[in-house]
Amino acid sequence: MMKLEMIQPEIIPGFDVLKWKQETQERIYRETEGMTGEEVRDYLRKGSERFEKKMARYRAEMKKGTC
């Protein structure tokens, strides 16, 4: 069985995660309004790819100790 490492998230003073979540949901709704199911899947896939690239860069920086 693989053990997952628990990472303590950084606390950012003044950051309201619920407000951020709601704003993000509203933005996605506006950007996908009127799209077909296929277009929404493509939109989400592209967003996921951008996120994965960003995370790969972050992980590389963490390994180097520059972050």
Image (cartoon, helix red, strand yellow):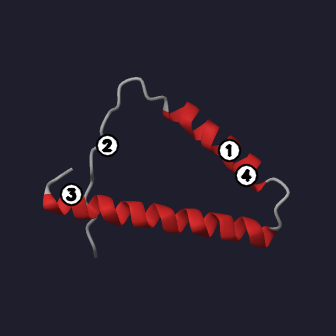
Residue 64 in percent (x, y) is at 15, 61
Which amino acid does the dot numbered 2 rest on? Pro
What residue did someone put label 4 on?
31
Local SS, label 1: helix
Local SS, label 2: loop
In the rendered image, the vertical position of residue 26 relative to residue 42, given as above or below: above
Question: Is 53 left or right of 31, judged from the image as shown?
Answer: left
Residue 20 in percent (x, y) is at 55, 36
Between marks 3 and 2 in the image, the one whose residue lies nearer the viewer: 3
Residue 9's disc number: 2
Question: Is 9 left or right of 22, judged from the image as shown?
Answer: left
What residue did someone put label 1 on?
27
Which amino acid does the dot numbered 3 rest on? Met
Q: Residues within 10 Å of mark 3 (few under 14, many from 20)?
A: few
In the rendered image, the vertical position of residue 30 relative to residue 1, given as above or below: above
Q: CA distance from mark 3 to mark 4?
A: 33 Å
- Name the N-terminal-most of marks 4 and 2: 2
Q: Are marks 1 and 4 in contact (CB under 8 Å)?
A: yes
Local SS, label 4: helix
Q: CA distance from mark 1 to mark 4?
A: 6 Å
Residue 66 in percent (x, y) is at 17, 53
Which amino acid does the dot numbered 4 rest on? Glu
Q: Are marks 4 and 2 in contact (CB under 8 Å)?
A: no
- Name the N-terminal-most of marks 1 and 2: 2
Residue furthest out toward the left: 65
Question: Is 59 left or right of 51, judged from the image as shown?
Answer: left
Q: CA distance from mark 1 to mark 2?
A: 25 Å
What residue did someone put label 3 on?
62
Q: Residue at x 68, y 44 (%)?
A: 27
